[in-house]
Amino acid sequence: MNLVEFGATAALLLPLLGFIALVAGGRKLGEPWAGVLATLAVAGAFVGALSAFIGLLDIHGHGRAVTVTLFEWIPSIGVNTALLVDPLSITMALFVTGVGGLIHLYSIGYMHGDQGFARFFTYLNLFTFSMLLLVLADNYLLMFVGWEGVGVCSYLLISFWFERSTAAVAGKKAFVTNRIGDAGLLLAMFLLFGTVGALDYHSVFADVDGIAGVTVTAAVLLLLVGACGKSAQLPLHVWLPDAMEGPTPVSALIHAATMVTAGVYLMVRSSPLLEHAGDATTVIAIIGAATALFAATVACAQSDIKRVLAWSTISQLGFMFLAVGSGAYIAAVFHMVTHAFFKALLFLGSGSVIHAMDDEQDMKAMGGLRALLPITSATFIIGWLAIAGIPPFAGFWSKDEVLTAAYDKSVILWAVGLLAAFLTAYYMSRQVFLVFFGKARWEESGKHPHESPRTMVLPLVVLAGASVLGGALNLPFGPHLLTTWLEPAIAQHHHEELTVSRFLMLAGITTVLSLTGIALARGWLKRPERSELEPPLLRRAWGIDDAYAAVVGGPGRATANALAQGVDAGLVDGATMGVGGLVRAGGQRLRAIQTGYVRNYAMGIAFGVVMLLGWVVSRAGG
Amino acid sequence: MSLGGEWYLTLAAALFTIGSVGLLIRRNVLVMFMCVELMLNAVNLSFVTFARMLGDIGGQAVVFFVLVVAAAEVVVGLGIIVAVTRRRSGATADDLNLLRG
């Protein structure tokens, strides 16, 4: 077993072992050892992924992909429990375990004193295992196992504080919404298996030239339905803002950095299909751009510190879909990685603020926290500049690459993305100004904000460093580390040559717009109550939730009731009850024969004998 | 002189008819039981007759089976009758209609 195989297997199995150990003895370990065990398991997984990465570096060219077959799963359809270790999967595994490990560490401090301390880390380890299974699987079916695994963990962790009915409802909402997406993914798998007869990536992509264009388009659109559910794209985005009911580290890990990017990963992994899917990629780009703009507008009017970030996550995921739809798969991964850095940082920072403010989440009740939370505010500000797209922070480079690709695809999509980027700078500045600057609006409440413990601050500092330097992964001019690294694993797409003048023009426009957004948000420094800038329509997220509730609760419920009373009670129940009633009535009639008098039975026997004799005699005679 | 086989067969038919009619029209359980025995023995008689007429020992062998089974049946049947008459005296067959549907 070489380094690649060993590293990947260890990375996958360590969180699973951690999960099993915590299930068995988590309660006994208690605080903080359950958290330490979970963190060590994920840290070990990171080391495993790192060694697999180092092992991969020794292989050159297009052979840079190793399949590790753990065991045969369903031989009749050629599906094995096998890992595909290639540049794409190992990039995902590295940032899942890297960012995940930091968030585990942070959670030890954040979950301090919680009743479900051990349970929390049990779920987190199970989540990490499922996520690694998702990204490392070498076929769609095994990927789907991980896909459902992270879905279950998401549900469990959103409703972690299940005594609160809002949390329980939010978990249910996430679960049900994701089922819609999963149905699409399942159909896509059926279609691919029916056409190709295999589900492993290699066979499917090798046969893509031989499949009818319509089939590929349909498969990609169905995959897109699945990706929209998991990555909270229009119109299946409704669950993510509510998912903020979960503990903040969960929001950072699952609902910002890793799980919600699974849809983007699925799209990038299926890039050979996308290259043959024709107009389906335009659909992806339009959904991405629309989501990016839509979610950004909603984020402008939220006052809950975590909800702003949730809508911002949806918006940034829209950018990634825009990149995928424009054929810029590497830009999508690049933005995914940098987004994981700065969005995890922002969420953990907001968690630190919430922690300091005794579970206060309303930004209107904060303000002036900069001096009291020096490290949190400094790192948060770095995250803010990164997401706002200010050079030289990480977000600038990745977002610029996405927008450049969108510009090549269509000027309209680029303009929509640009507007979203402008709004991003605006709402993030609004958040930072409301929370860390201006007048302190919490003094009457008698709170004493304090900086968080060391286990919480350390991840913030590391992530802040990554948010500053993350852009170096793929600078537009230079060694193109990420592009060179990922190229063998991803379908080739023709791109326009990026000249210096074009880069300066596009990046210049983006930067100027971002700075304008920040400048426009300055008003929030003075006055936290400006309801004219928070129209109810935006506060209610354009009424999409209300519309869903109206449709599902009104005609939907009426249809269900009609079906329940008409078809189920009438037809289905009627058929089964009818058969039973028929038999019962027949029996009622027939029981009259059983008189209980021996002479009647004897008469019956005698009669039967006579009839039989008559039959025999008549046959003999004839 | 010996009588022809037809006489025996006629006698067997007569005994069988008496037995079956008795079973159908009588109400006394013991008498009905005797009627069953009569029918069984009528059949036995016809078996023996045919065995003799056809020179086949098989018919006589069957008679032994019938006798053994009839003996066992008498034991069980009389046991039931004794058990029933202990619970209710002078019971006729028509009183025993507990298994009415």
Image (spheres, coloured by chain):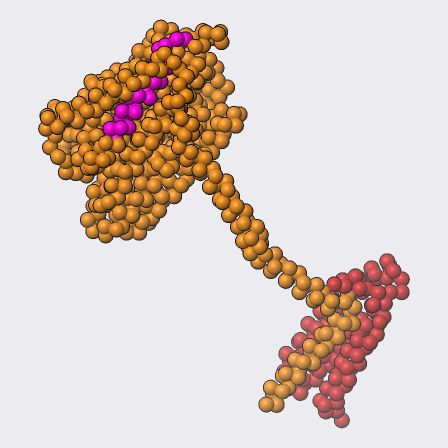
Chain colours: A orange, B red
Q: Residue at x 55, y 56 (%)?
A: A571
Residue A588 magenta-highlighted: no
Residue at the outermost right position: B89
Residue at the farthest bottom position: B1
Residue A140 location, x and y as percent? 31, 41
Vertical order, B69 against A120 (above or below): below
The foreground one among A292 and A73 is A292
Rendering coords of residue A349 (x, y %): 36, 16
Residue drawn where x is 60% and y is 86% of the image? A619
Residue A418 inside the magenta-drawn segment: yes
Classify the position of the N terminus of chain A by image quarter. Answer: top left
* Quarter-of-image position of residue A284: top left
- Quick check: A559 above or below A243? below
Q: Examine the rendered structure and indicate whether residue A341 appears above or below residue A453.
A: below
Q: Can residue A320 be seen in this snapshot?
A: no
- Where does residue A515 sit, x and y in percent of width and height? 24, 19
Q: Magenta: predominant secondary structure element? A: helix
Q: Is residue A294 left or right of residue A32?
A: left
Depth check, front residue: B95 or A243: A243
The quarter in which the C terminus of chain A is drawn is bottom right
Residue at 84% x, 65% y: name it. B95
> Foreground residue, B17 or A558?
A558
Q: Is residue A169 left or right of residue A146?
A: right
Q: Which residues are magenta?
A: A417-440
**Seen in the image, is A68 located left or right of residue A524?**
left
Q: Position of residue A595 (x, y in %)?
A: 76, 67
Q: Is residue B92 above or below residue B86?
A: below
Q: Dividing the picture into quarters, in which one does residue A149 lie?
A: top left
Question: Where is residue A151, by image quadrant?
Answer: top left
Camera sees residue A614: yes
Residue at image location 48% in from the left, 27% down from the top: A167
